[in-house]
């Protein structure tokens, strides 16, 4: 499909806005984005499947959900009046024991629908029954990056096979090495993780320093924090990073900074589960690599990157007593190119020519987009999923004005409604 | 206009959901809401302007924005990298000095559009050039409750006239006594405020304990907190309440509880301005009257009650180390009936027969509404303005599927775009 978007504005990679712009795609790629006056060579003699007048709306790269458990949509608003321990043992684990690949397929489709409706074009997903998610992703046309979630209860024995199989499954699907967390993974398995990272010279991701109890437990077991432990074991020798990073010490941040590792923030989940508030301003002032994710629907409960970006911008203000502790442009960039680079999607970081055609159209006629004192700040401080008019992944329009082109949302609704009863 | 909504679900006043329901209006009132099987007497022999099949969507009372400065939409994302003091003195005050009634009219209309698109059916508004807002509200069909904002720079001399004039202006418009805050109001004016409250036996509202500096200043001036001072002066003898309430002491809460005063939370504004985090769980466990507001677009920057309700539910979790410190059903009720009662809209608290027809339709086919493990929790934890399919105020459909019926949003966009340039 070749698409031509006229009469638009474009969010450039430096977070400035190009006025009077056009964007042109050829199959899965962007071939032009910039001033309409310069578009002529990419138009003349070409035929387009659709020419879309954007009415001066903004086209921007899709948001990248850099940490999630997609199929956990089954657990949205499920027994979340329980304490974390009861929630896991009474509500989640018994249901996860019953989860079949078919369940994961449908609950993943539900997540993709929410991602697309909220302007998210790719996710970094930690869950199981991966073939079912991969099938759902390819059918949907959604860009799905798996992260290994191996732990002492399973996953290490298949980690290498997953890495090889899912990285050759489909262009929309990839797999990054990862394990669940220090507190679920013994030292031998951590060493195995390091060996695999070295064998493939590959980055590794994991949950890290999400709760203070996790950090204290690690210090009791090893005398050091998880970041120090993983670094000593060589797990991060080829890059990677961690999810949550709430309780990082200065030393932990220095390790991540020196090794160029990604810190992925999950503000809503950390608030809801009472895990804590990440001092985002420190990561930014120290020039660290950052990305943003929603975590799963069980602990958030929305898969809404706008809410995450808002909170990553404002939550540091109270601690620092500074009404502008965090620059919203830095957070927007983290939600776009930070996430893409973190997930290994180097061809999804911007709307420059040659990049994958993963982008969204933002309604600039919606009251929350007005007035245009500052478009980037409006997006971060006032944005919500309701502003997303269109979501394009890999050059295909997957969501437009409330409708999904590849997902039958009524079928998803019926199937998931019946499945939550089966799992109960 | 007489409307009949079939095939719907209804949020009852106890926050339970009535399945297989209908809702019927007659002019500005709800004449029936409940089980479809019981609707017959309200249907037979009647004619309806529209019969709307809701496709099993949820009808619920409109959200009540119980503290805002509507016309401050002019200041959204305006210079908010400044500190609070610079922001006020360099960005806001110079523009407010130039604001004409015409500016207030258009920027109020922009706010009403955002309210309607986000499921808000009435606002409790503190600002000036009130006749311009009142005109815009009546033209829009929006329910606008003014709160006095008198202070030492002006307003006390016209407060009584405003009270009498605006309370007889139009059924959609009302006026509640109020003043700006202790730190902008001298003791003589506070005493005058109290006399007026006694003369009309009327409730009084004000900004209260928003920042710790405000409380410390009051203690230096009077030796007591603002709540104690106002109580001693008799300002609250006929009810009312305060906005923000971030730095309330145990004694302040006891005064508010004993006098039945409303505490109105403004979580987003307090985070963004680094004012602090209100311990919402304490207000709830002590059985206090609570409501929720967005504050103005300059300090939020969205006029989004969903984001407020989410934060009022989860922000107490970290402080209490409890993943369920606040019941989302209590917060949803505060966002609906709490707000209505606080603003004196006793006929807007629920969808019971006899109440004003102020309600919204929530898309139950949107992925963020699925699965339906718990509808109320989905609304609070996963809701966003994009779920609002229809907003009805005073029996009239003002917003439906992205379109406004009484606001020309393109005209609002053009006018406000030109006006922000005039004000700069």
Image (spheres, coloured by chain):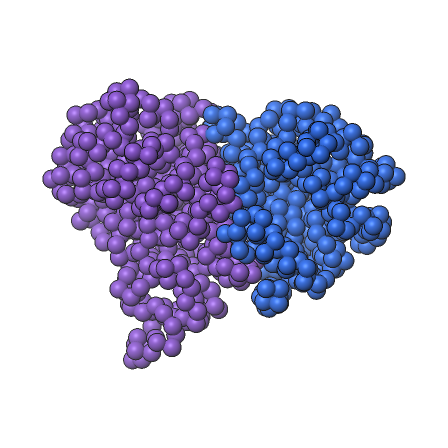
Chain colours: A blue, B purple
Above or below A371: residue B347: below
Toward which corner of the image does residue B361 lie, by quadrant?
Answer: bottom left
Would residue B356 be found to the left or right of residue A45 on screen?
Answer: left
Q: Looking at the picture, does residue B27 appear above or below residue B421?
A: below
**Location of residue B107 in the rendering, given as x and y in whole percent from the top left corner:** 37, 40
Residue B227 relative to residue A139: left or right: left
Residue A241 lies in quadrant? top right
* Furthest residue in direction bottom, as rendered: B45
Residue nearest the observer in this picture, A266 or A38 = A266
Image quadrant containing the N terminus of chain B:
bottom left
Image x and y of residue B293, in percent: 37, 43
Q: Nearer the viewer, residue B133 or B411?
A: B133
In this rendering, position of residue B52 left or right of residue B201: right
Where on the picture, by quarter, is residue B195? top left
Residue B160 appearing in the image? no
| Residue furthest to the front | A220
The residue furthest right is A199
At horizontal 28% and vertical 42% (from top left) the residue drawn is: B257
Question: What residue appears at the point 28 percent right and 35 percent down from the top-left corner?
Answer: B206
């Amino acid at each position: 499909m070749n698409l031509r978007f006229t009469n638009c504005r474009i969010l450039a990679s430096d977070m400035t806005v190009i006025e009077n712009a056009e964007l042109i795609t050829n199959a899965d790629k962007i071939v032009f984005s910039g001033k309409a006056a310069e578009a002529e060579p990419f138009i003349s003699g070409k035929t387009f499947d659709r020419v879309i007048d954007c009415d001066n709306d903004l086209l921007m790269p899709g948001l990248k959900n850099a940490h999630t458990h997609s199929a956990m949509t089954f657990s949205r608003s499920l027994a979340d009046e329980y304490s974390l321990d009861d929630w896991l043992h009474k509500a989640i684990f018994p249901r996860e024991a019953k989860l079949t690949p078919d369940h994961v397929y449908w609950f993943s489709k539900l997540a993709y629908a929410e991602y697309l409706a909220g302007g998210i074009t790719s996710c970094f997903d930690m869950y199981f029954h991966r073939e079912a998610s991969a099938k759902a992703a390819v059918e949907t046309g959604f860009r799905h990056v798996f992260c290994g979630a191996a732990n002492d209860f399973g996953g290490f024995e298949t980690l290498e096979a997953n890495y090889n199989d899912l990285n050759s499954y489909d262009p929309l699907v990839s797999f990054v090495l990862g394990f669940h967390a220090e507190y679920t993974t013994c030292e031998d398995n951590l060493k195995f993780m390091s060996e695999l990272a070295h064998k493939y010279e590959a980055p590794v991701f994991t949950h890290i320093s999400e709760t203070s109890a996790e950090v204290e437990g690690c210090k009791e077991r090893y005398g050091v924090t998880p970041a120090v432990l993983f670094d000593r074991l060589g797990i991060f020798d080829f890059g990677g990073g961690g999810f949550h990073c709430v309780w990082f010490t200065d030393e932990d941040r220095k390790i991540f900074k020196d090794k160029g590792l990604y810190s992925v923030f999950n503000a809503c989940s950390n608030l809801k589960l009472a895990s804590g508030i990440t001092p985002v301003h420190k990561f930014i002032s120290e020039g660290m690599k950052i990305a943003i994710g929603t975590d799963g629907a069980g602990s958030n409960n929305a898969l809404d990157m706008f809410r995450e970006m808002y909170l990553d911008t404002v939550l540091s203000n109270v601690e620092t007593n500074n009404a502008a502790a965090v620059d919203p442009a830095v957070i927007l960039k983290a939600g776009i190119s930070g996430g893409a680079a973190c997930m290994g999607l180097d061809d999804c970081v911007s709307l420059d020519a040659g990049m994958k055609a993963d982008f969204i159209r933002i309604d600039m006629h919606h009251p929350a987009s007005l007035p245009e004192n500052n478009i980037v700040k409006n997006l971060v401080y006032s944005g919500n999923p309701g502003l997303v008019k269109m979501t394009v992944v890999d050059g295909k329009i997957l969501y437009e004005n409330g409708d999904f082109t590849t997902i039958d949302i009524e079928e998803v609704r019926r199937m998931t409604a019946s499945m939550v009863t089966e799992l109960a």
